[in-house]
Amino acid sequence: MRMSHIGICVSDLGRARSFYSAVLGFAEVGGLLVSGDTVDALLGLANVDVEAVYLERDGFRLELLYYRSPGHQGEARPRPMNLRGLTHLSLRVTDLDAMCASIEAAGGKVLRETLQSNPDHHSRFVMATEPDGTRLELIEAPGNPATIPQAARHQ
């Protein structure tokens, strides 16, 4: 029928809401609180009490999940790109430098060692992270943002 959403576990719901809204341009479209045996069984966790916030941008829906119980796991660092599962969210931006500054001002990190450019296509790319470590690929490229950008080819 259609894709519903992608979920991201966050350690601080207020900070995540602000980051995804103010920095990345998502709009909040809903939320819910869930708990109980059905949720425990669905998520494979015990004693779940979770708040979900739904955000949208460009027809894409993101679900921020804040686990009041049993809490969150893991460190706020980028996952290796070859680790199975979700690797990153990708966004086209008009001003890469300004977006990087906004990300850092809001508690994220720019992975400056990943900065790449393709002079033939007047484009630049860099990886960053939001405050909980989810990777963000930022692409500054002219033209239709719906087209797939061309990376520099190495021979």
Image (cartoon, rainbow, N blue to C red):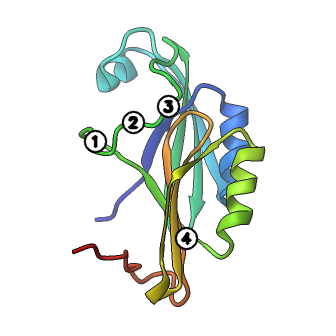
Given the image, on which type of amino acid does mark 3 rest? Arg
Q: Residue at coordinates 65% horizontally, 50% vertically from top-left?
A: 20
Numbered tag placed on residue 85 in the rendering: 1
Q: Position of residue 115 (x, y in %)?
A: 52, 60
| Residue sitting farthest toward the front | 155
Residue identifier under label 4 = 58
Q: Name the element at disc 1.
A: loop
**Disc 4 vs disc 2: which is toward the camera?**
2
CA gap, disc 4 and disc 2: 25 Å
Binning the other alpha carbons within 10 Å of mark 2 as few (below 14), some (14 to 19) or many (20 upward) gives some
- In the image, taking residue 47 as reference, residue 43 lies left or right, namely left
Image quarter of the C terminus: bottom left
Q: In terms of sequence position, does the residue under pointer 4 or pointer 1 come before the other?
A: 4
SS for tag 2?
loop
Camera-side residue of 94 and 20: 94
Give the distance between the C-alpha atoms of the residues marked 2 and 3, in whole angstroms. Answer: 6 Å
Of callouts 3 and 1, which one flags the residue occurring earlier in the amino acid sequence?
3
Left or right position of 114 against 84? right
- Work out whether residue 92 or residue 127 is closer to the camera in this orientation and state it: 127
Where is mark 2, residue-wise? 79
Q: Amino acid at mark 1?
A: Gly
Up the image or down, 84 lies above or below 59; here it is above
